[in-house]
Amino acid sequence: MAERLADIATQIQNVRQLEAVVTAMRGIAASRAQRGRSLLAGIEAYHAVISRAIGQALTMLGAPVMDPSRAHGRTALVLFCAEQGFAGAFSEHLFEHAAAELANALTFVVGTRGEIVARERGLSPSWTAAMATHVDAIPSLANRIADALYQHIAAATISKIEIVVSRSTAGGGIQIERRSLLPLDLSRFPQPGNRLPPLTTLPPHDLLERLTAEYVYAQLCDAAMHAYVTENQARMMTMTAAKSNIGDKLNTLSQRERQLRQEEITSEIIELASGTEALRRR
């Protein structure tokens, strides 16, 4: 009996240590998600400025000319997956969302966990990179993704680029969003009503090309930051569920410990009573 009680006490101690780890991981994930959300407004403002500039630049062009060498390439899908574990099925949901196109598309997988999921599904990503684990690494990550995409564009292997990314909703949930990155959908850039072209020092096509590069960078920064926030939010939700399960396990172990202690006390009382009765009979 004493040995069984010792085993239960050891299990309770181990579970409480696990609870402390889970609580710490949940706190770290919540802090990172909050930090990422605080920076999203700045990225969105930057994106809005570039969009307005493209709309103004379009007033200087009669009809934008698309590069015909890119018309026959494949579609590139950029999937922003999880970098670290304990995020549930965060990465799997992205691949399920894009399952119909994965076989014929060039896949650019961001996130070590996403690369693992791709290999498990028999996919060979065209390019992979580790997802940022802190917000300061987002700009350099966006630059690396853009460089990889531009290399394929220069080689005329892709004609269309789409982003598949998760983002948090107002109710605390997570939804998957698919965005078209290139070629630019010019209808998304409203032109000024006065149609007065801005004063520039660059030819119109050069100006639009540079603004397009800034727009791509802004979109990649925005997607990477949303992925960073939602990965940490998914981890926070997973840790919350784990903490609840740990609480249930602790309650079960505590009840079992009390039951064993009661059985031990009952056994000792029976032994004392039996000993007293034996002495009385002698």
Image: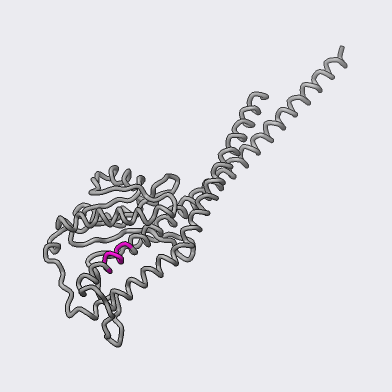
228 within the magenta span: no
Tell me where residue 226 sits by quadrant. bottom left
Q: Give the quarter of the figure containing the C terminus.
A: top right
Residue 103 vs residue 270, the one in the foreground: 103
The magenta span reads 211-217
Q: Residue 61: x percent and y percent?
A: 20, 78
In the picture, measured across the screen, residue 112 lies left or right of residue 28, that is left
Q: Residue 180: x percent and y percent?
A: 27, 65
Residue at screen point 49% across, 64% down = 171
Q: Which residue lies furthest to the front in this view?
A: 201
Up-down: is 257 above or below 211?
Answer: above
In the picture, measured across the screen, residue 82 lies left or right of residue 26, that is left
Q: Residue furthest bottom?
A: 194
Q: Provide the major secondary structure of the magenta segment.
A: helix
Residue at screen point 12% across, 61% down = 72
Q: Residue 2: x percent and y percent?
A: 67, 24
Tell me where residue 11 sits by quadrant. top right
Residue at screen point 28% across, 78% down = 56
